[in-house]
Each structure stands twice: as C-alpha cells, then as structure tokens.
Image (spheres, helix red, strand yellow):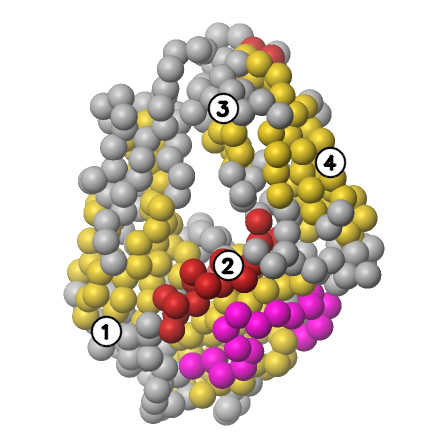
Amino acid sequence: MRVLLPVALNLIFSLILPLTEMLPKAAAFSIEQPKNGSSHSSNERVAVALDLGAVTGITKVRFYWYGEQEDMLKAFVEEKLAGIATAPPFGANLRPPPAATGLYRLLAVAEQENRQTDDEEWAVFDEVLLTIQPHGSLEEIDFQTDKPLKFGRASAVRVYDQLDFLGKMINLPVVGRYSDGAIRTIRSAAAGTTYHVDDETVITINENGRLRLVGNGTTTVTVKNGGIEKKLDVLVEVNTEPNQPPVGDPGPTQNVYSGETVVLNGLKSYDPEGGSLQYSWSQIRGSKIALLDPDSAKARFFAPFVVEPRLFRFSLRVTDVQGADSEPTVVDIVVEP
C-alpha cells in the first residue's frame, strides 16, 4: 500500500500556485505537461510536453529536478540534470530522482542558436512544482545522527569554546526506508512528516524538521509519517546566556526589467540584542543566475533578458554573533522584457 501525502499538502499549493499564476504564459516558452501541482510516482517516467510559443532558434532543452527549497547556487547543476532534448518539439520522458518524495521543481531551460556568443544573458525557461509520491510503502523511520542527540557539554566533544549555544538551529536528519529499497529524506511536511516535542523549553522544532535549542535539559522528539513513528532523545547542556534569534528581512517583491542591476537588500534584518549579523543569500526559483556578493547584506545580479515576465526567488538567512540563525525568508523578483 502506497503512502499518500497528507491533505495538508493542498494548503501548501494554495499558497504557492497563485504566485506562479501571476505570470502569463501566452505566446512564450512554457511547460504544458505535466501540469503545475500534479502528482507523480517516483518509479514512473513523467511525460514532458513544451509549448515553444514565439521563441525561435531553440537548439536544445535541458531539464533539471530540484527540491522545492533547494539552494541552486550551491548545487552542482550537472548533478541535477534529468535529461536533454535536441529535436523539436523538445519533449521528454523523465524519471524523478530515485530518492524523491514531496515537493519538487521540474525546470526546463532552452538554449538558442548563437546565444552562447552574445554578450547579453538570456533566460528562456519554465518550471512547474510537482508532488512526487514514493513508490512502495514506508517501512521504517530513522535518524541519521547519534542517538541520543547531544548538544554542548552533553556531547562530550568539547567542554570549552562550545560550538553549541542557545538559538542554534539544525535540520534534523530524518529518513524513511521504503519497501522499494530506497532511503528517502522525509524531514519536510511535504513528505507527510509531523513532529512532537515533549518539552519545548529545551528545544522547538518546526513543521519542516528545523530544530532550535532554547534551554538546557532532556526531551524527546516524536516523528510520525504514514502510521509509523520514531522517537529520538535529545540532551542539551550549553551556555545559558539568553540569546534571541535574529530576524531576516529580504525586502519586498521587485518588478525589474531585463538588463537592470538588481539589488537584494537585507539591511532591514535585525538582531533583537542589537548585535551585528552575517548574511547568506541563496536562489530557489528560476533558471540559475550569477549572484554577486551572496554573503553580504546587499547581493546583486544582472537581470537576464527574457521574452516574457519570469519569476526568480531568493532566500535570506542571517546569523548573529553568537551563531544563532534566523528562519529563512524569501523575496520574489519578477523580471520583465
């Protein structure tokens, strides 16, 4: 029996799909099949049909799979390559990544004749957000970490110059073993996983498995998915100096034109204690671009030339002087011809 994603996933799409529907697709390069928001099994090929619209001179189309929130700036693009189509109408039959589950983006990037010799950077692409359902049933949940999970002096790794501190955040490494033999990361809510913490004065954990240290003590995290649950004991013994996490602010949505210099401004981010911040920008939507100064308050890029309005999304995370992280926040940049 296959594990179905929870009904709550529909709520995620209700928030995401309106953003994509803001961008018109008439008379331009677009993915016609599969439909945005459709669901597919991890063991079956996805038939891809393109509408080339008014775009001419296309010589090939490259297809990529990305996790919904995956940092494209740090990923090796060729490792994400799902296939290349070299003959019109450039359709393809693509298999999702074997370990995929939850929300994934299918990105199609067109290459045009002679564009590689032009000084202008063109972005001819489209992407759809899909739900990948794991083939086979979930048999076991596990944590790819020491058990129990220890922080600070409790870990017996360091006693002085602790690397662990209140406000620190980590992504809890939760995996599922499935009957088809695959081991899949199931940390996010989109994979159907839920969390419960016995004592939230020690740690908190959000719906996507991001754990934060909030106090010393011992507690237990219970993870559930598809009727299966697993418990993990957590021990925290760190410096008790109060430290509130910083708040990231990547600025409002921007509408810009091709060729403009775009500034991603995180200067409205702040630390409640008034300390200085470190900045980290990443790209999570759109065709991959060259982002300048991604570790500064103001990152920049040159808006690529497009044949229709296209959405690029960036995520900002800030860190205070004690090492506490903010929750990632996002900003959308709509590039117009």
Q: Does the residue at mark 4 contact the one at mark 3 (Cβ under 8 Å)?
A: no
Q: Earlier in the sequence, mark 1 or mark 3?
A: 3
Residue segment shown in magenta: 30-45
Q: Earlier in the sequence, mark 4 or mark 3?
A: 3
The numbered mark at residue 213 is 3
Which callout, 1 or 3, points to the residue nearer the camera?
A: 3
**Where residue 179 appears, x then y in whole percent?**
82, 55
**Where residue 73 appears, x then y in whole percent?**
41, 53
- Residue at 55%, 78% in the rendered image: 34
Q: Earlier in the sequence, mark 2 or mark 1?
A: 2
Density class for disc 3 (Cα within 10 Å; few <14, some 14-19, many ≥20) is many
Q: Does the residue at mark 3 contact the one at mark 2 (Cβ under 8 Å)?
A: no
Q: Disc 2 marks which amino acid? A: Leu
The numbered mark at residue 11 is 2
Alpha-carbon span between mark 4 and mark 3? 20 Å
Alpha-carbon span between mark 3 and mark 2? 28 Å
Alpha-carbon span between mark 1 and mark 3? 43 Å
**Is residue 257 shown above or below 142?**
below
Q: Give the secondary structure at mark 4.
A: strand
Side of 193 relative to 207 (left or right): right
Q: Quadrant of residue 172?
A: top right
Which callout, 3 or 2, points to the residue nearer the camera?
A: 2
Identify the residue at the far top of this view: 160
